[in-house]
């Protein structure tokens, strides 16, 4: 949740200084405990994208942030979403 909040706030900010991207390191570190190999590869891409910001190329970081949000969404525990009960069936009960 913390990583998604940080990514969302970064995407909504009109300007980020390259040093602001260091905050993403904390979010990535928190994700590493439960990260899949795909997530680890994506975080490595983010490290390269953050270096490119220092060279004046900001677009890979935007792609990285959007992709990271997508990976977080795909890996979310959908049973814990509001309005859903864990173990509930999607089909109506026959009565």
Image (cartoon, grey):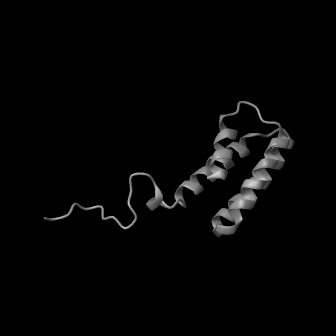
Percent across and percent down for residue 33 are 69, 68
Look at 75% across and 60% down and name the residue there: 29
Name the side, left or right, on which 19 lies relative to 76: right
Percent across and percent down for residue 52 are 82, 46
Name the side, left or right, on which 50 lies relative to 5: right
Please identify the residue farthest to the left as the structure is shown.
95
Look at 46% across and 54% down and name the residue there: 81
Is 37 located above or below residue 13 in the figure?
Answer: below
Of 69 and 57, nearer the camera is: 69
For residue 34, what is the image quadrant?
Answer: bottom right
Is 73 located above or below residue 94 in the figure?
Answer: above
Percent across and percent down for residue 46 are 74, 53
Please give the count of numbered marks on the rendered protein.
0
Please identify the residue farthest to the top as the structure is shown.
14
Look at 39% across and 52% down and name the residue there: 83
Is 16 located above or below residue 60 in the figure?
Answer: above
Name the side, left or right, on which 46 lies relative to 90: right
Quadrant of the frame with the C terminus: bottom left
Look at 59% across and 56% down and name the residue there: 72
Percent across and percent down for residue 16 are 78, 36
Is 48 located above or below residue 57 in the figure?
Answer: below
Of 73 and 54, nearer the camera is: 73
Of 74 and 78, nearer the camera is: 78
For residue 94, what is the image quadrant?
Answer: bottom left
For residue 13, what is the image quadrant?
Answer: top right
């Amino acid at each position: 949740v913390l990583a998604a909040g940080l990514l969302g706030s970064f995407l909504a900010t009109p300007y980020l200084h390259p040093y602001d991207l260091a905050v993403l390191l904390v979010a990535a570190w928190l994700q590493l405990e439960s990260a899949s190999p795909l997530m680890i590869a994506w975080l490595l891409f983010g490290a390269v994208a953050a270096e490119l910001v220092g060279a004046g190329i900001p677009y890979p970081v935007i792609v990285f942030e959007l992709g990271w949000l997508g990976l977080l969404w795909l890996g979310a525990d959908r049973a814990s979403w509001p309005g859903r009960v864990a173990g509930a069936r999607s089909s109506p009960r026959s009565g």
